[in-house]
Amino acid sequence: MFLGTHSPRLDDKGRLFLPAKYREELSGGLVITKGQERCLYVFPMAEFQRITEALRAAPVTEKAVRAYSRVFFASASDEVPDKQGRVTIPPPLRKYAGLRRDCTVIGANTRLEIWDTPAWEDYLEQEEEAFSDVSGEVLPGIL
């Protein structure tokens, strides 16, 4: 499970230090792809394979399944962190997420998300009030 908020910087070669607490789990490989709201999703290889199987089982006759799969897989990049725990984020993914130097990496349960820091701050500001309002809908009877 991925938790917390981290503030690594993107270097001039487009590399990002993974949060130290997750380096071992991600050392065998990971997949970076487009996420919603212009962030990037980072999946451990096993989780990406689980999602792949779920999408493989989805009916290809459904237009939404085809559209989602195309964007999800076409933008995906499998990476292996270097010995220092850095991963290279391909230029098209950096452009999609608007990544500059300061990044925010958040834990989002089964994945990490990489955000341009100002974009994350804007998103959080907009969604924090809604967070309180929807807890009963998202987790009925739990919180």
Image: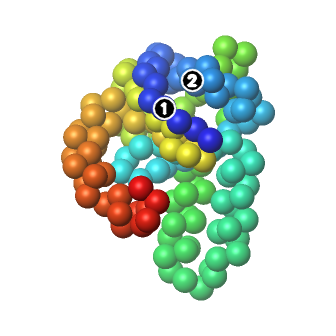
Q: Is residue 49 left or right of residue 74?
A: right
Q: Name the residue under label 2.
A: 19
The location of residue 139, given as percent across then percent down, is 44, 62
Quadrant of the frame with the N terminus: top right
Residue 84 falls in image quadrant: top right
Q: Do the residues labelled 2 and 1 touch (CB within 8 Å)?
A: yes
Q: In this view, does 34 lie to the left or right of 78?
A: left
Q: Nearer the viewer, mark 2 or mark 1?
A: 1
The circle drawn on residue 31 is none
96 is higher (above) or lower (below) than 19: below
Q: Is mark 2 on a helix, strand or loop?
A: loop
- How many marks can you see? 2
Quadrant of the frame with the C terminus: bottom left
The location of residue 52, given as percent across then percent down, is 69, 61
Q: Mark 1 points at which residue?
A: 4
Is residue 108 visible from the viewing direction of this image? yes
Q: Is mark 1 on a helix, strand or loop?
A: loop
Q: Residue at x 43, y 22 (%)?
A: 7
Residue 124 falls in image quadrant: top left
Give the class, few, some or many, for how many residues have Cα within 10 Å of label 2's Cα (few <14, many ≥20).
Answer: some
The location of residue 115, given as percent across then percent down, is 40, 36
Q: Which residue is drawn at 37% across and 47% down?
A: 38
The location of residue 134, given as percent across then percent down, is 31, 60
Given the image, on which type of amino acid does mark 1 rest? Gly
Is residue 105 visible from the viewing direction of this image? no
How far apart are the alpha carbons under marks 2 and 1? 10 Å
Given the image, on which type of amino acid does mark 2 rest? Pro
Give the class, few, some or many, for how many residues have Cα within 10 Å of label 1's Cα (few <14, many ≥20).
Answer: few
Q: Which residue is drawn at 59% across and 85% down?
A: 61
Outermost residue on the bottom side: it is 61
